[in-house]
Image (cartoon, rainbow, N blue to C red):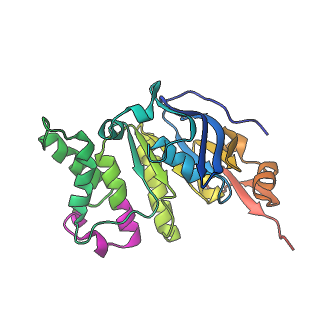
């Protein structure tokens, strides 16, 4: 199994990063660059540090050791709004304020662009209209977020981070709690955004979805990156057995030819 080190970079990455909770390392001495223009998906067993690593890339969780770098500069040396103009995060299970409409939720994505000298402008309105259009939410713009279905609500959150107008989108388990149809709807939107030139990093649990939609896979185990690269090169039966303890066959997806995991009967 190849060791995970560096690839071509957007300027966002980590160097020798360790992150602990309660004194126990969750991410251990990880060095990783986010590849430019790719739809990267981080996979690995529960508790391996996927979401923690993503939070460090978003300037949410500061490392105990090592650095998170954005264009060669420590991410934590940026002011919050300044960093948010470069990197947008959709966290797990975000909660909308009571009574907020879809449009007002999306408006919050413009917050990083405002200062005492720069208040609301036509550019903000244009960014919101683009985000609503891109996520097919124009007709629901005046609906309260709490009245949306699960899939619609997740699209509203995606619209908010789109309105932020960053080159990098970080999505932490964006398909959790969605039914399978809405999972694929959201992942297809991510693929379209990637096709338009955005760099996207997502944490996913489903290996077949990861292989189908990712252009770049990052595999973690016990807090470390063990390998990375194109799904056709990374996702092997040996890797799945080693990382997940799951004997399986890898066969081509009949529609996309991407690798598809077929587990063995464990009995």
Residue drawn where x is 40% and y is 67% of the image: 151
Residue 120 picture location, percent across and down: 13, 44
**Magenta highlight range:** 139-155
Towards the viewer: 128 or 116: 116
Image quarter of the N terminus: top right
Whether residue 256 is visible: no
> Does 147 appear in magenta?
yes
Name the side, left or right, on which 11 lies relative to 1.
left
Residue 212 picture location, percent across and down: 60, 52
Q: Residue furthest top?
A: 72
State whether residue 35 is above or below residue 264.
above
- Snapshot quadrant of residue 124: top left
Name the side, left or right, on which 250 lies relative to 229.
right
Q: Residue furthest right?
A: 267
Residue 28 picture location, percent across and down: 66, 43
> Mostly what secondary structure, the magenta segment?
helix
Whether residue 9 is visible: yes
Residue 83 picture location, percent across and down: 36, 37
State whether residue 4 is above or below residue 104.
above
Residue drawn where x is 54% and y is 41% of the image: 63
Image quarter of the C terminus: bottom right
Towards the viewer: 184 or 29: 29
Name the side, left or right, on which 266 lies relative to 223.
right
Residue drawn where x is 42% and y is 44% of the image: 169
Q: How many marks?
A: 0
> Does 125 appear in magenta?
no
State whether residue 186 is above or below residue 10.
below
Name the side, left or right, on which 48 lies relative to 82.
right
């Amino acid at each position: 199994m190849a060791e995970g080190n560096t690839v071509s970079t957007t300027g966002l990455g980590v160097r020798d990063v360790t992150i602990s909770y309660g004194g126990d390392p969750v991410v251990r001495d990880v060095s990783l660059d986010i590849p430019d223009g790719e739809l990267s998906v981080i996979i690995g067993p529960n508790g391996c540090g996927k979401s923690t690593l993503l939070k460090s890339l978003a300037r949410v969780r500061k490392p105990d050791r090592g650095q998170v770098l954005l264009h060669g500069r420590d991410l934590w040396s940026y002011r919050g709004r300044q960093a948010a103009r470069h990197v947008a995060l959709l966290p797990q299970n975000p909660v909308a304020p009571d009574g907020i409409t879809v449009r007002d939720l999306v408006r919050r994505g413009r917050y990083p662009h405002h200062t005492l000298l720069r208040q609301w402008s036509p550019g903000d309105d244009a960014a919101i209209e683009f985000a609503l259009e891109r996520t097919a939410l124009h007709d629901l713009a005046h609906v309260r977020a709490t009245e949306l279905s699960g899939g619609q609500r997740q699209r509203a959150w995606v619209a908010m981070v789109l309105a932020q107008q960053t080159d990098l989108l970080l999505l932490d388990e964006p398909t959790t709690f969605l039914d399978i149809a809405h999972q694929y709807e959201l992942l297809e939107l991510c693929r379209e955004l990637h096709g338009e030139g955005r760099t996207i990093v997502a944490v996913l649990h489903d290996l077949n979805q990861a292989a189908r939609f990712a252009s770049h896979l990052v595999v973690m185990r016990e807090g470390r990156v063990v390998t990375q690269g194109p799904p056709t090169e990374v996702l092997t039966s040996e890797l799945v057995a080693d990382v997940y303890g799951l004997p399986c066959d890898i066969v081509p997806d009949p529609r996309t030819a991407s690798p598809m995991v077929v587990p063995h009967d464990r009995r």
